[in-house]
Structure formats: C-alpha cells, structure tokens
Amino acid sequence: MVTAQRSRRLRVNETMLDPIVNFFTRIFQAIGRGIGLVIAWICWPFLAAGRWYARRGWLIKGPIGIILLVLVGLYGYFFLETQRWTGFDTNYVAAYNFTGMRAAGGEGGEAGAGEGGTRTCGRSAITEVTADLIDFNVDENAWISSMILYKLGLFGVPWDNTPFFDNKASFQRGVNQAIRRTTVELVDTLGRVRGTSQVDSGLQDARGAMQIDEYTWYFGLNPFGFKTPTPAFYRAAARDLRAFNDRLETCTAVFDARADNLIQFIDRIANDIGSTSAILRERSENYNGGWFDFRADDRYWFAYGQLYGYYGILTAARTDFADVIAQRGLATLWQATEDQITSALRLQPAIISNGREDGWIMPSHLATMGFYVLRVRSNLVELRLVLDR
C-alpha cells in the first residue's frame, strides 16, 4: 500500500516537472540552433570557395594553392611573434654593471690612461641602454607595427580595435616613445657642451632615424612605391648610438653631465609621462566597457612599455650623473622613483579591463596604471625641484 502511494507521488512530481524540463530543453535547443547558424554563416564563404576551388583545373589551383600556403605561413609567423615576448624582463637593468662604470667623459669629462698611455674616457650608460632597447624592440623581437598582416588588420578592421594581436605592438611603441625622447635630448643637450658646441652628427642621424613612422613596410601608397621598412631605420639608430659611445671612450665626443642638463632631461621625461597619464585618464573616464573595451589594452600596454623603457634610461642616468646626484643628495629620492616604476611593472593582467572606477565586478586597470604613472611623474617633478634649488 505504501509502495503504491509512493509511486503515485513520484508520477505526480514527474508530471509537474515535465513542463519545466521541456521549457529548458527548448531553450538549449534554440541556443544550439543559433550557434549552428552562426557557425554555418561564418563557414559558408569558405565552403563555397572550397567547392569552387575543387572544380578548377591545376593551372588555377596551383597559383591559388601557393598563395594560400604563403598566407598560412605568414599568419603562423604573425601569431608566433605577437605572442612570444623574447627578452622581456622587468628587472633587465640588473644585467648592467652600472656600478662599475665611470661617469661619461669626453671633452670636459674625466679621462684616464689606457694601454700604452692612450687617453680614455667613460662611456654613457644612457646611450648604451637606449641602443639596447632598440635591439630589444627590433632584433630580439619582430617589430609588429610594420608587419604587413598587422597593417591589413582583421578583415580590414585595425588590430588595435580588436582584442587580438595588438598588446605587444602597443608595448613596443611605448618603449619606442622613451627611446625617441632620449635621442632628442642626446642631440639637443647631453651630447653638446652647454648647447653651444657643434651637434654630434652621429647622434643627429640616430635622432632622425628614430623619428621614422612606426608603420612603414617595404611598400606603401603614400607616397607610392618601395620603401625602407621601419626596423631598418631603428637598427641604424642603434649603430649610431654605439658609435657615439665608442667616440666617447676615445675622448673624441662629448657627454655634458651637468646639473642643468639633468634638470631638462628629467623635465622632458616628466612631460612625456604626463601626456600618457592624460591619455589613460581620458579613456578611463569616458569609456567603461570593462573587459569589452578593446582599446583599453592599447593604452595600458603603451604606458607599460613607456615605463619599461624609462626604467632602464633613468637607472642609466643615475650613473652618468653620479656626481650631480651625490652633490645634491638625490640618491634616496632617485631610488624611490625607480621603485615606483618597478611597482608599476609588476602589474601584468592577463585581460585588460576598463570598468568604472567605483565598480565592483570589472576592475579599472587603466585607472590603476594611471595612478602609478602619476606617482612616477610626481617623483620626477620633485627631483627637478631639488636640482633647481
């Protein structure tokens, strides 16, 4: 009797649940059909092209097949280079023996006696790090921004407007911004005596090469014709910088490590970083797409790359201007500035989110990076004020 009642209750419960089960079954079936339609819509052009290709003769199949193989190879290389960050190290300055370097010499600098009594001077740490950063960008890694597939984009949509394949390119452009600023200062102030001596031709060539457009490939439409790609110019700039350092070592070039030059150098870097902080603020305040803001990662990794480059350059400046820093008692403040940069470089989120600054679901990585950028800038401004007293 009890068993019969229990069976009836089970049948009643199953009858009550049937509409609910059927409802969710229909929902999942509809979702499945929708996904199937989307996949079919995406695959249809390729299937149609495959059927057309299968009906052609080998005179048509051969060239098309070769073109397809080339495209597959190019995309494979493009994917590999955009995902592999060779030589990336947030503590890359540890590889330099800055403590063992003398301050840069040359005309007006300290000189010593080399082998056979040959007069020798110090090399510039700033110049060495700048040349190495160029090598890191275009030799250890492929320069993404001028690759043909990066320029073509995703079916005509620039990669910067998508969540794919653009993080490394933005990072490289950020590092390049620090390099460009430094080459300008080397020509205008650091590589001359009080700004009145003749401009170093090698440094001038390096500065000109670094101003080349970051997106130039072997061929272009404006102006129309064949061109020298961007990486070739940057490699030439690195050679010019190393040649300048060689001349410094033989006391035939100038590195003017005076306090007023350091003031101007710090001031220009602070302004450069301040411009980036404004870009981060504008994006953070006016766009709140969270994980779906596909331009947020460009801003983030550009700022990250800029700090990455200035980390090595400012650490090198500590050696080139060692006497000035010691005389003004700036060692502690300078170390604090470097520590702020290393703190920012620890921030490496897998997915960049640009949510509301007071949001609780999606973080605002742009606001966080902007905070660190402003802290670095405030330290640089404080360094400048102490030097200017």
Image (cartoon, rainbow, N blue to C red):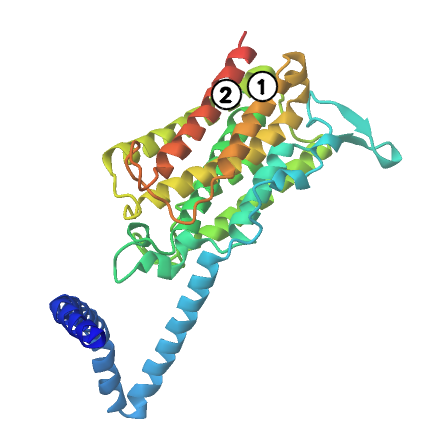
Q: Circle 1: is it few (<14), some (14-19), or many (20+) Cα within 10 Å?
A: some
Can you tell which mark lies on residue 333? 1
Q: Which image quadrant is residue 285 in? A: top left
Residue plotted at (66% across, 39% down) = 94
Q: Quadrant of residue 361?
A: top left
In the rendered image, the residue lying farthest to the right is: 116
User: What residue lies at 26% left-to-right and 62% top-to-bottom?
Assistant: 155
How far across and down, in percent of the image, does residue 101 sit?
A: 73, 31
**Residue type, mark 2 in image:** Asn
Please tell me the numbered disc located at residue 379. 2
Q: Where 143 sits versus 103, above or below?
A: below
Q: Are marks 2 and 1 in contact (CB under 8 Å)?
A: yes
Q: Left or right: 283 with respect to 202?
A: left
The x and y percentages for residue 252 are 69, 31
Depth check, front residue: 199 or 343: 343
- What label sits on residue 101 in the rendered view? none
Q: Helix or strand or loop: what does disc 2 sit on?
A: helix
Q: Is residue 252 left or right of residue 54?
A: right
Label 2 or label 1, whichever comes before in sequence order? 1
Compared with residue 108, is residue 223 higher up or lower down, i.e. above or below?
below
Residue 204 can be seen, yes or no: no
Indicate left or right for 5 with 372 as reference: left
- The three-letter amino acid code for the residue at tag 1 is Leu
Please tell me whether mark 1 sits on a helix, a strand or a loop.
helix
Relative to the observer, which residue lies in front, 54 or 208?
Answer: 54
Q: Quadrant of residue 123?
A: top right
Residue under the point 42% across and 43% down: 301
Q: Residues within 10 Å of mark 2 (few under 14, many from 20)?
A: some
Residue 113, image x and y in percent? 83, 29
* Viewport quadrant of the N terminus: bottom left
Q: Is residue 19 visible?
A: yes
Q: Depth check: 229 or 272 in front?
A: 272
